[in-house]
């Protein structure tokens, strides 16, 4: 995945998944008695997505000579 368009498309996909997880987590919390294990797993996945998005965004920034 070296083309900027491919990277940008993947970033958008991951951002959508990140927002979806956010909505699921919020819904579980509002439910009242969320499954703590499930909640922890969802939050961990959300953090993994955020890290992956950051790495992909870094690939879009051109290297600047020192």
Image (spheres, helix red, strand yellow):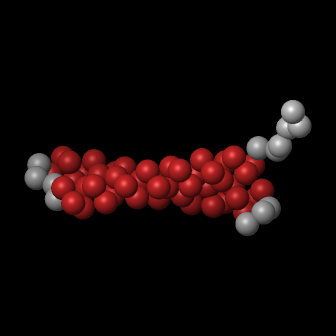
Indicate the position of residue 60 as horizontal and vertical percent values. 75, 49
* Quadrant location of the C terminus in the rendered image: top right
| Image position of 11 (left or right of 66) | left
Residue pictured at 33% horizontal, 58% vertical: 42
Q: Is residue 61 above or below residue 10?
A: above
Q: Depth check: give the residue in front, 25 or 51.
A: 51
- As drawn, the residue found furthest toward the left would be 33
The residue under the point 37% across, 55% down is 44
Which residue extends farthest front?
A: 66
- Residue 66 visible to an observer of this rendering: yes
Q: Residue furthest right?
A: 65
Q: Is residue 46 left or right of residue 51?
A: left
Residue at image point 89% right, 37% down: 65
Q: Position of residue 57 (x, y in %)?
A: 67, 48
Quadrant where the N terminus is found in the figure? bottom right
* Whole-percent x, y for residue 39 in the image: 25, 55
Q: Residue furthest bottom?
A: 1
**Apparent side of residue 19 relative to residue 30 in the rendered image (left or right):** right
Left or right: where 65 falls relative to 10: right
The residue lying at 49 percent from left, 55 percent from top is 49
Q: Is residue 24 visible?
A: no
**Number of marks:** 0
């Amino acid at each position: 995945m070296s083309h900027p368009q491919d990277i940008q498309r993947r970033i958008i996909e991951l951002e959508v998944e990140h927002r979806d997880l956010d909505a699921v987590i919020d819904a579980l919390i509002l439910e009242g008695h969320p499954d703590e294990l499930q909640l922890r797993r969802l939050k961990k996945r959300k953090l993994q997505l955020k890290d992956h998005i950051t790495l992909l965004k870094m690939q879009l920034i051109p290297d600047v000579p020192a």
